[in-house]
Image (spheres, rainbow, N blue to C red):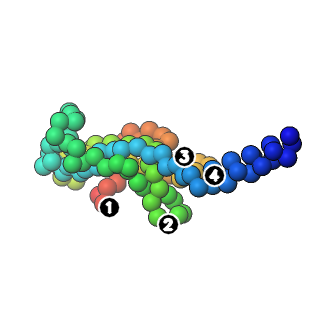
């Protein structure tokens, strides 16, 4: 009986080695500068915007090469100080697994100022 249990356990383990799961989410990805791409701006309605939907949404991890399945969708909206232009950016991100939240955009609120393309 014990020998049969070991055989079943080994067979199950071998079978599970062949199965791979990837869990990810779909996110809308777009940029609108000064309202030039209204489907990206607020109010956001998913009418005729499937061309902006990326699934699965993949992102980079700090200190790693390649892309990995995203864990969060991100939306940033603001106004540039120097010109008064508005900007809306939608995309995806993932937690890089570091111990602090200072560089993990999806772990903390980012109300206030931010830089986009060195502006």
In this view of the protein, which residue sits in the foreground, 60 or 69? 69
Residue 74, image x and y in percent? 37, 43
The dot on residue 15 is: 4
Tell me if 49 is positioned left or right of 69 in this view.
left
Calculate the distance from the C-alpha at mark 2 to the C-alpha at mark 1. 23 Å
Q: Earlier in the sequence, mark 2 or mark 1?
A: 2
- Which label lies toward us, 4 or 1? 4
Calculate the distance from the C-alpha at mark 3 to the C-alpha at mark 4. 38 Å
Residues at badges 3 and 4 in contact (C-beta under 8 Å)? no
Q: How many marks?
A: 4
Residue 90, image x and y in percent? 30, 46
Tell me if 94 is positioned left or right of 5 in this view.
left
Q: Is residue 53 visible?
A: yes
- Which label lies toward us, 3 or 4? 4
Q: Earlier in the sequence, mark 3 or mark 4?
A: 4
Calculate the distance from the C-alpha at mark 4 to the C-alpha at mark 1. 50 Å
* Residue assigned mark 1: 118
* Residue assigned mark 2: 65
- Which label lies toward us, 2 or 1? 2
The dot on residue 66 is: none
Q: In terms of secondary structure, where does tag 2 sit?
A: loop
Number of residues whose C-alpha sits closer than 10 Å to that of mark 1, classed few (under 14), some (14–19) or many (20 or more): few
Residue 22, image x and y in percent? 49, 49
* Residue assigned mark 3: 101
Calculate the distance from the C-alpha at mark 3 to the C-alpha at mark 2. 21 Å
Q: Earlier in the sequence, mark 4 or mark 2?
A: 4
Q: Earlier in the sequence, mark 1 or mark 3?
A: 3
Q: Residue at x 17, y 36 (%)?
A: 47
- Name the quadrant of the N terminus: top right
Residues at badges 2 and 1 in contact (C-beta under 8 Å)? no
In this view of the protein, which residue sits in the foreground, 2 or 54? 2
- Which label lies toward us, 4 or 2? 4
């Amino acid at each position: 009986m014990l020998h049969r249990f070991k055989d079943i356990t080994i067979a199950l383990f071998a079978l599970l080695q062949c199965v791979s799961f990837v869990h990810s989410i779909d996110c809308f990805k777009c940029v609108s500068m000064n309202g030039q791409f209204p489907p990206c701006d607020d109010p956001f309605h998913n009418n005729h915007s499937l061309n902006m939907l990326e699934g699965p949404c993949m992102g980079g991890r700090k200190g790693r090469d390649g892309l990995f399945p995203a864990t969060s969708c991100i939306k940033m909206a603001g106004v540039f100080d120097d010109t008064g232009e508005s900007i809306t950016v939608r995309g995806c991100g993932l937690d890089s697994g570091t111990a602090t939240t200072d560089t993990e955009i999806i772990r903390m609120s980012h109300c206030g100022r931010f830089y986009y393309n060195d502006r």
